[in-house]
Image (tube, rainbow, N blue to C red):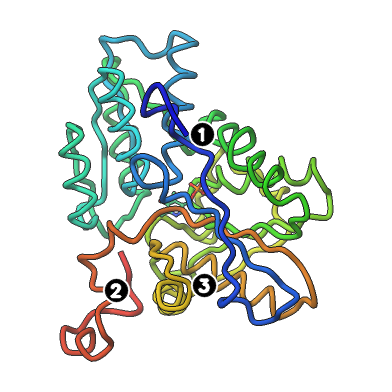
Amino acid sequence: MRYRDILDAIGDTPLVGMPRMSPKPGVRLWAKLEGQNPSGSVKDRIAKRMIEAAEDSGALTPDRIILEPTSGNTGISLAMVARRKGYRLTVVIPDNASSERISLLELFGAEIVYSPGEKGTNGSIEVARALARDDRYYMPFQYGNPANPLAHYEGTGAEIVRDLPEVTHFVAGLGTGGTLTGVGRRLHEHNPDVKVVAAEPELGELVYGLRSLDEGFIPPIFDESVLDRRFLVSSSDSLRATRELTEKEGIFAGISSGAVVHAARRIAQELDKGDIVCLLADGGWKYLSTEAWAPEIERAEKGVSETLWW
Ligand SMILES: Cc1ncc(COP(=O)(O)O)c(C=O)c1O
């Protein structure tokens, strides 16, 4: 493939079989590898889409500063897009975000404002909303921006239909709900029988990038009617599946991907045949400092937590 520009290289990610992760031969599991996007996550899709929509509508002009609350990936993607297009960017991020995320934001030239770690992304949203009262800022706000699900409807979802028309299930993590809403709508248009499943952390458990609807905040862009099922996953099950992905399939993915694959395997156990697409939102690189892949004995010695993950 040849592209004129890095932003044209966003999307069209590979769909890769995971035969060794499936509990039954008749049920095929597929990984949509979003870590292959230029800045390393699914969020490149929505960053480009939200910025270009704001340019087209006139909401974003060269004198304004882009401002966004994010657990990391959207900030990194926005920083890449802002760099390439010449905008300034301020991100609000929980102060316990992994060091790799902060380094990536810095290298793309973003300004970082920290919010209290214990409040998670809800704390970042609060801080960003207060800053956004200043007119110099333009806030795309991924939780409420229709360009977020649209990027998945026209991109991610259409790619799955093209590459696997026989798809029976789609499983993705729930953060803003943009992936599930956009892909779910596209897949239901293709075949109303396709089941759309959200992987959510158990209440009080942390899986980076994901949120539980039971915390009380329902993102405005999230269309709950698209969901056929919610699947609650613990941090330790997510970590175990993330490690297994590397061991069995040679796929190096982030922790939310483990949550998705864990949910998909449970669903596979209930079926005789099917084609389940798992959205793997990012690669494992940004989580290396968390020791998630360290040998079990080292993790135990260092007291690496299997239950509280951030
Ligand atoms: C690592 C990771 N996985 C999954 C998600 C969830 O995606 P979405 O915001 O489209 O629900 C996000 C983003 O929030 C994320 O950063």
Kindly indicate whether the residue at mark 3 contacts the one at mark 1 (C-beta within 8 angstroms): no
How many labels sit on residues? Answer: 3
Q: Nearer the viewer, mark 2 or mark 3?
A: 2
What residue would you read off at disc 1? 144
Kindly indicate whether the residue at mark 2 contacts the one at mark 1 (C-beta within 8 angstroms): no
What residue would you read off at disc 2? 292
Q: In the figure, is residue 171 to the left or right of 269?
A: left
Please tell me how crowded label 3 is: few (under 14), some (14-19), or many (20+) other residues with Cα within 10 Å: many
Q: Which comes before the other along the chain, label 2 or label 3?
A: 3
Q: How far is disc 1 from disc 2 in space, using C-alphas?
A: 32 Å
Q: How far is disc 1 from disc 3 in space, using C-alphas?
A: 25 Å
Residue 49 is marked as: none
As shown in the figure, which amino acid type bears the numbered disc 1? Gly
- Whole-percent x, y for residue 261 in the image: 54, 69
Residue at position x 40%, y 21% in the image: 4
As shown in the figure, which amino acid type bears the numbered disc 3? Val
Residue at position x 60%, y 73% in the image: 19
Kindly indicate whether the residue at mark 3 contacts the one at mark 2 (C-beta within 8 angstroms): no
